[in-house]
Image (cartoon, rainbow, N blue to C red):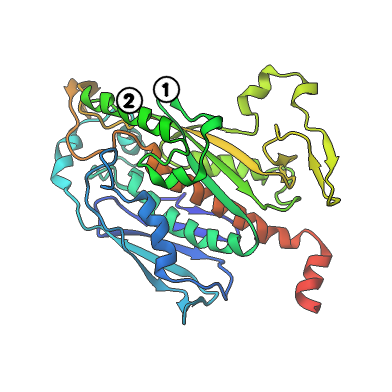
């Protein structure tokens, strides 16, 4: 299978299946000398771990990470960093029936069309459990970014029809509720909405917003390796993501140029900045120094107990009800996945940017 690697210099390769012995990631290109231990990675994995609330799958997994290589005496060694999370609570029998038919909204049919074979136990490589490797690698990338002054804040912007209010935005609330919403009132309303979905044997989608601060201007490329294009690719590589917008996004289509253009200003510090941020912190594929703001749309969980119409592998029509343990909403556990993929993009492009000027090379090799 091609397509399990991501990045150019800071490059990751995820591996493993939902119901295999484990899942993990190999990180190549991580600079030596980064302080790193399993606890640094575990706090990220704990944010996507199942079984933490009524609104996540009850599958019980500790998702405990093991560092297998690339770290010596508490620091990265400049060699490949290999991370493993063992699967502990597989119930493959829950999926034995689906070997004969295609689940709506899943990759069952397309896997068969491509390979003529598929691992039907929880979706195999197309399972959300694959994102463990991304999150583990994202934790490492986030540590690198923190040392360069870049920070990422990611949260649930909406669940179904319930959206946060800018007037009630409270960053301390993000980790205080099960839905990772920075608005306590919206979180209560969204939980009530999800309860209704569950009573109806249905699921919900939502949106996630990511705000990146501290990114210096001039990171990214102008043609095929645009910062915003790479962020979009990273987000669309997440299985449940169906939409991406940055800055004013689709709202820009309804504006005039005079409304959407961001006027440049000189701050009291002498730094060049913008009056507004409709560009979302990126101009011409490169960071402009303002906060990078983007949003992703996440589809409803396709595995639902409600009756659905599908066909068997031979084309025979049937109605199904999907058994097993599934999230009624993917959004809360996807928040850290979005954050991790953003961290991977930023870290890779920061490293690539070292080749942008001779003065950068001279500073490294002659100072």
Q: Which quarter of the rendered picture does the C terminus lie within?
A: bottom right
* Mark 2 neighbour class, 10 Å CA radius: few under 14, some 14 to 19, many 20 or more: some
Does residue 58 appear in this view? yes
Question: At 28% from the left edge and 50% from the top edge, which residue is drawn?
Answer: 18
Q: Nearer the viewer, residue 283 or 221?
A: 283
Residue 100: image location, x then y, percent: 18, 33
Does residue 125 appear in this view? no
In the rendered view, does 310 fall on the left or right side of 67? left
Circle 2 sits in a helix, a strand or a loop, which is it? helix
For this orientation, the residue located farthest to the bottom is 73
Position above or below: 206 against 266: above
Sequence-wise, which precedes: disc 1 or disc 2? 1
Circle 1 sits in a helix, a strand or a loop, which is it? loop
Question: At 18% from the left edge and 27% from the top edge, which residue is drawn?
Answer: 321
Position above or below: 234 against 31: above
Position above or below: 29 against 62: below
Question: At 79% from the left edge and 72% from the top edge, which residue is drawn?
Answer: 363
Residue 48: image location, x then y, percent: 37, 49
- What's the mark number on residue 232? none
Position above or below: 236 against 367: above
Label 1 and label 2: CA atoms lie apart by 9 Å
In the rendered view, does 357 fall on the left or right side of 89? right
Q: Nearer the viewer, residue 31 or 145?
A: 145
| Residue under label 2 | 193
* Residue 83 location, quadrant: bottom left
In the rendered view, does 353 fall on the left or right side of 127? right
Residue 62: image location, x then y, percent: 27, 58
Q: Nearer the viewer, residue 267 or 207?
A: 267
Residue 251: image location, x then y, percent: 63, 23
| Residue under label 1 | 161
Q: Are marks 1 and 2 in contact (CB under 8 Å)?
A: yes
Question: At 18% from the left edge and 25% from the top edge, which residue is drawn?
Answer: 320
């Amino acid at each position: 299978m091609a397509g399990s690697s991501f990045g150019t210099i800071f490059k990751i390769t995820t591996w493993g299946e939902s119901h295999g012995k484990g899942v993990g990631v190999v990180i190549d290109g991580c600079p030596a000398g980064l302080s790193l231990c399993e606890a640094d990675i575990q706090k990220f994995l704990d944010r996507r771990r199942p079984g933490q609330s009524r609104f996540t799958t009850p599958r019980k997994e500790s998702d405990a990470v093991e560092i297998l290589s690339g770290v010596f005496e508490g620091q990265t060694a400049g060699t490949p960093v290999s991370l493993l999370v063992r699967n502990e609570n597989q119930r493959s029998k829950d999926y034995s029936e689906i070997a004969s038919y295609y689940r709506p909204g899943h990759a069952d049919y397309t896997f068969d069309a491509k390979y003529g074979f598929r691992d039907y136990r929880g979706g195999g490589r197309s399972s959300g459990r694959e994102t463990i490797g991304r999150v583990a690698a994202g934790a490492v990338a986030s540590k690198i970014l923190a040392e360069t002054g870049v920070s990422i804040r990611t949260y649930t912007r909406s669940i179904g029809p319930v959206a946060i209010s800018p007037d009630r935005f409270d960053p301390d609330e993000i980790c205080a509720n099960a839905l990772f919403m920075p608005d306590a009132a919206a979180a209560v309303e969204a939980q009530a909405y999800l309860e209704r979905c569950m009573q109806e044997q249905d699921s919900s989608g939502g949106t996630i917003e990511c705000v990146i601060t501290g990114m210096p201007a001039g990171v990214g490329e102008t043609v095929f390796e645009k910062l915003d294009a790479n962020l979009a690719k990273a987000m669309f590589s997440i299985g449940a993501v169906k939409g991406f917008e940055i800055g004013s996004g689709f709202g820009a289509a309804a504006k005039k140029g005079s409304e959407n253009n961001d006027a440049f200003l000189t701050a009291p510090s002498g730094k060049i900045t913008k009056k507004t941020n409709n560009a979302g912190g990126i101009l011409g594929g490169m960071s402009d120094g303002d906060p990078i703001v983007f949003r992703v749309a996440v589809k409803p969980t396709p595995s639902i107990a409600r009756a659905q119409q599908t066909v068997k592998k031979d084309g025979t029509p049937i109605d199904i009800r999907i058994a097993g343990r599934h999230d009624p909403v993917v959004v809360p556990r996807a928040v850290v996945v979005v954050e991790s993929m953003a961290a991977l993009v930023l870290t890779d492009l920061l490293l690539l940017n070292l080749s942008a000027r001779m003065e950068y090379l001279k500073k490294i090799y002659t100072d």
